[in-house]
Amino acid sequence: MKKISSCLLPVLLVAQLANAEVTTNEQSVVEHSTAIPTSVIVIPIERMIERGLLHVIRRGLDQVRETENAALVLEMDTPGGRVDVTETIMRLLLDLPEHVQTFTYIKKDALSAGALIAVATQNIYMAPGSRIGASAIVGAGGDIEEGDMKEKHVSALVALVRSAAYTNGHDPDLFESMIRRDMEYEIDGEMIVPAGQLLTLSDHEAKRMVGTNDVQRPLLSKGTVANIEEMLTQAGIENYTLHTITPTRAERLARWIEMFAFLFLAGGLIGIYVEFRTPGFGIPGITGIILLGIFFWGHRIAGLSGDWQLMIFGLGVLLLLVEIFIIPGFGITGISGILLMLIAIFFTMASPLPETDAPWFEIPTIDVQRALLQLALSFVFTLGIGTILSRYLPKAIGFRNLVLETAITGRTYDPQKNETPSEASPPPIQSGDTGVTVTSLHPSGYARINGQRIGVVAQGSFLDINIPIRVVSAQGNHIVVTQSPQQKDQA
């Protein structure tokens, strides 16, 4: 009997060690480092969650990695934002070293994307009167498309959220009920949210204790506290140094540019469109190039535009300027410049986020659709507003002083001033004057009228070079011409 016991003893010891190892591994999913941090880094997440926020998040997480024995706090007040940016932030948080303690402090709202970012942290605390939840995927006009495409997006997001919840000790079903409207969620036989509703919790509801009498835990929030300092005290963190990641002026400006990117894009395209619809070169073209430059600068500061997009855009602007100032008319050079600028704009709006390390040809379908939609809306907006401006802007008082023209509209001959006719300037252009095109008119270009080389705009169809023309109207610098009737009869 003693021999049998002696033989079984090693087996029992191995089994106990294996069981202990399994238990330890299971607990590591929800238990994290107990080392008390000496440095706490706070990253504010405010307003809409968009791509411009990523630069601030990356800078803060880099400081967390570089600081010895640091903890991270996300100070949150957001109504939500873009899904792709949310997923990127979640992955960045989940990739932090295991010894880093992570907190979310909800000042007011952690709705939609904010709630999903919170699940990627280990500890969630809420301020009095704050809320968390309502994280269904929606588009610009409401719910995204129905059917397989919607389920594809939702399923991928739910998988990431459930994985983050398991890792940080949260209830995966609770967060899934924030995303799926058709999912019920109940605790201990009590219905928390029925099917057909999205789960949203107040600070009182989120901190309620659930479970049996022997084992109880908070539903979500570990406590309602007035500020970050009280949260850290309740978490047992003392004698620490608090560092808040404050966005720089350039980062704040870049976020606003990203939020209103459509306006800068549409404004830039309108300026260029008006420039080609009116003679000469002036304030519309300059304004258009400046607005598009601001568009790229903001994306560059936010880390969303790489060197190659900027180089393509710069080359497009250069070709456009060559077409305007050097090459007569408007042809392949100007068209190539505009195409290069549009390509750069498209890949700036649809390029993969830097953290994904994906090549440019693996752009997510949803990003391609969003970029194409923004470009299409910009074109419609440009054609509408640009047509109105190109028609009425040249008539505005003071517009002539803002346009660079090659025409000379100086004095006419005055016999009272003892001048010879050769010293006087040619007479002003009037309706009915005739001339010939010296460049192609598409629709703007240059013509020679009364011995003057002057910028004109063709009425109706485009005109080629060396076509006889007649002035239809002349109001300041806005000279409208049409093909001479005699030339039309000969054709």
Image (cartoon, rainbow, N blue to C red):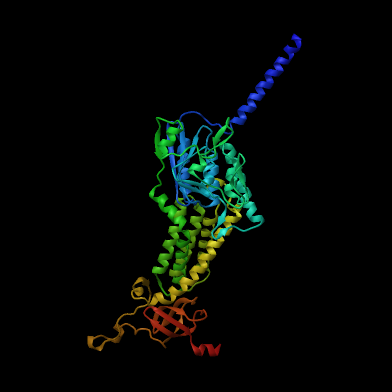
Query: In the displayed structure, would residue 368 be above or below residue 190?
Result: below
Tell me where residue 480 appears, x and y as whole percent.
Answer: 44, 81
Q: Is residue 297 something that shows in the picture?
A: no
The one nearer the camera, 84 or 26, is 26
Task: Please tell me whether residue 183 is drawn above or below residue 447 in the rendered image.
Answer: above
Asked whether 450 or 195 is in front, the reply is: 195
Give the number of callouts: 0
Q: Where is residue 477 in the image (x, y as percent from the top left)?
A: 38, 78
User: With 423 as the anchor, is 224 left or right in this view?
Assistant: right
- Report the residue at 48% width, 69% height from top: 382
Quadrant of the image containing the C terminus: bottom right
Q: Is residue 421 left or right of residue 124?
A: left
Q: Position of residue 441 (x, y in %)?
A: 48, 77
Q: Is residue 319 visible?
A: yes
Please state, as top left, top right, bottom left or bottom right, where the N terminus lies in the image. Answer: top right
Q: Give the residue at x 55% y 62%.
A: 373
